[in-house]
Amino acid sequence: MVKKQHVRYISVRRGTTADREGTAVQGERLIRAQVLIAGGGPVGLLAAAELAAYDVDTVVLEPRTEVSDQPKATTLHARAVQSLARRGHLPGPPTPSYADEPATSAFHFAGLPGLTITAPPDEPEPVLKCAQAALERHLESRARAAGARILRGHRLTDAVQDADGVRVTAEGPEGPEHFRAGYLVGADGARSTVRARAGIESDTFPATVSALMGTVTLADPGALPKGWHRTPRGWIVAKHDGDRTHLRTLNCDGAHPDRHRPVTLEELHREVAHIAGRDIAMHSPHWLSRFSDFARLARTFARGRVFLVGDAAHVHFPIGGQGLSTGVLDALNLSWKLALAVRGSAGPGLLGGYDAERRPLARRVIDGTLAQLALMRPGPEADALRTVFTGLLADGGGSGHLSGLISAQDTVLPDPTGAGGPAAGTYLGNTALSTPDGDTDVIRLLHDGRPLLLLLGEKADRHRKEAQAWAGLLRTVEVRPTPGVPYEAALLRPDGYLAWVPGDGGLRQVLTACFGPGAPAG
């Protein structure tokens, strides 16, 4: 028989420690949390910042001892930018300025110029350039300020879930450490240990191309101007930063024979010369790596008390810069639902909505990147396709659909209740609002992370009474009628999507589905 004894449990709430009685295997020290997140990249740190802001005990396990400055993702697309603004996480000034007119950003599709991405008035710029390292530091600061414990130098090695939670083992600076959490979020990247331990299988798409990436100094910076360079042998993307040049190459002749082999300056030099058709001298390499078009989609983003976000759930060819934005939207979609589940305020199907909403959108991103790669391949068929797409982009004929594909602004979420009304699942754009307490807007009203009930019409009292049982959960705001919100009332989720507007179904039905039965009357 295994001997049991009382042990010291460490509570990580607000970074303090507290003694608690419990039982564990002799000699073990358990660190308890309500939610444990494996992976402290931008997606994991965003989830931590969100959960901690909801007053959820949150621990992050991150193998790296510090943020890496290796160049990685640099692009946040419109819906991710808009959603970060609504939760107050947008990097930059605390109160960004928003244009009165639609804002536009030039972008590309499969390396072809001419794509225009437009954000509605009163929204942030539609394409935000932000180095991943800077975003990580920003989100780590917010997570720590909200009370999350970030444990660097800790790599998750095992996870076993039961009916009450998840037991996690991690390798820390002083050896194995043990954790007990109500829920586990895997934000631990493409080779996710959480995904493997949870037994979640994936659909994969094998690599068919080889690509290299690195930062070098060019002997003659003018030999390779910034931008996208296509030749019959592949592509080179060059981005200059002072005397350094960040290079990416694409060779469609086949996958790397050994994807784990370290990249050398000589290999990058040969590949650039092969694709360019001429020698381009370079020296002083940094951050050399290889990648491919290998893609993966987990068959579920949730199993029991385990959830996957970001690259742990989906991986795709990085054309279009959609990976970071997709992970950001995963974290923002999951966090408020998980926080309500921890607090006992989630409806019976709320957490299940995470997989139902995010997995189809991740599949859409993978399909879109596969389509872009098809346009980038050499050969007469691809040349003909590029000619057609170049024409469509030049006259705007395809920009609407392609812009939505890249920016995710055309996302409409499913309405599982069937009672959400005609606009359920759409995103409510930012607009100025006049309330008895003064002027505000949608973005600022969502900063506190609570579901938001807007009351605009003469029937406001009826809707207020219908929502009375959830008064302690909702933020209810009376708003003078405005063209920006063309409904007599609207229920917004914390991530900015409409859960209900008046229609055939009732507000009470949607509130019950999302947030449970509410408080009893009286």
Image (cartoon, helix red, strand yellow):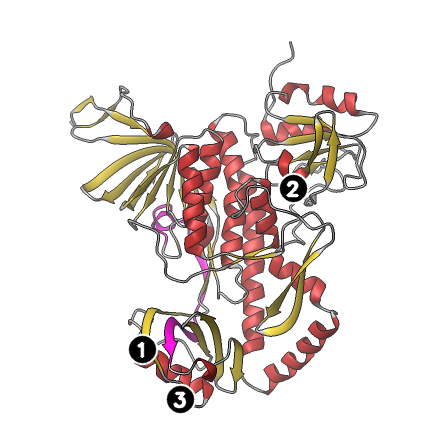
Q: Which residue is mark 3?
A: 279
493 vs 242, left or right, is right
Mark 2 sits on what residue? Answer: 497
Which amino acid type corresponds to the residue marked 2 in the rendered image? Tyr
Residue type at mark 1?
Answer: Leu
Of the numbered discs 2 and 1, the one sitting upstream in the chain is 1
Q: Residues within 10 Å of mark 2 (few under 14, many from 20)?
A: many
Helix, strand or loop under label 1: helix
Residue type for callout 3: Asp
- Image quadrant for the C terminus? top right
Q: Position of residue 453 (x, y in %)?
A: 69, 30
Disc 2/disc 1 C-alpha distance (Å): 47 Å
For the residue pair 94 and 151, the one nearer the viewer reads as 94
The x and y percentages for residue 248 are: 44, 73
Is residue 258 visible in this depiction of the protein? no
Mark 3, secondary structure of its residue: loop
Dot placed on the residue nearer the N-terminal end, 1 or 3: 1
Q: Is residue 226 visible?
A: yes
Instruction: Tell me where residue 152 appears, x and y as whole percent.
Output: 30, 44
Foreground mark, 2 or 3? 3
Q: Residue placed at 39% from the left, 82% from the top?
A: 271
The span picked out in magenta is 192-218
Marks 1 and 3, how far apart in space?
A: 14 Å
Q: Nearer the viewer, residue 150 or 306?
A: 150
